[in-house]
Image: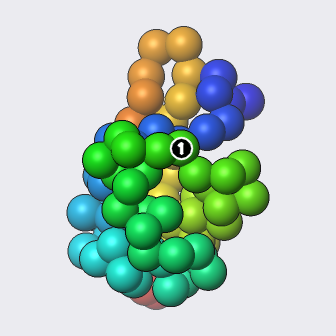
Amino acid sequence: MRYNSNMNSSQCRAARALLKWSQTQLAESSGVALSTVAEFEIGKREPRSDNLTAMMSSLEGAGIIFENDSKYVGVKLKIKRGK
């Protein structure tokens, strides 16, 4: 169970880096405005709940796992291995 179900701006940047995604790619894949991603990542504003959920879902769909518990906050990338 997640300690905090929301992603923070550092996790967002780290997740994009692991995926080698630009802010534009995240915005397009999650259906949010580029300004929403950019302003969230620099700490200018918190996205609406539905936009944050869409961003997280897009990243998780691409293999990102968010770590949010009482000891750790971070991101991991699930590696898909062939047969």
**Residue 41 in sight:** yes
Residue 56: % across, % down: 59, 58
In the image, residue 82 lies at what x, y percent?
A: 43, 85
Residue located at (67% from left, 52% from top): 48
Q: Residues within 10 Å of mark 1 (few under 14, many from 20)?
A: some
- Foreground pick, 2 / 22: 22
**Whole-percent x and y of residue 23?**
34, 73
Identify the coloring: rainbow
Q: Is 83 drawn above or below residue 12 in the view shown? A: below
Q: Residue at x 53, y 44 (%)?
A: 46
In the rendered image, which quarter is residue 16 located in?
Answer: bottom left
Q: Is residue 53 visible?
A: no
Residue 26, by quadrant, is bottom left
How many numbered marks, from 0 up? Answer: 1
Q: Of residues 76 and 17, which is closer to you in this image?
A: 17
The residue furthest top is: 70
Residue at the image point whose x is 43% and y is 28% from the top: 73
Relative to 8, 17 lies left or right: left
Reading the image, the residue beneath label 1 is: 46
- Under mark 1, the amino acid is Glu
Is residue 60 left or right of 45 when viewed as pictured? right
Image quadrant holding the N terminus, namely top right
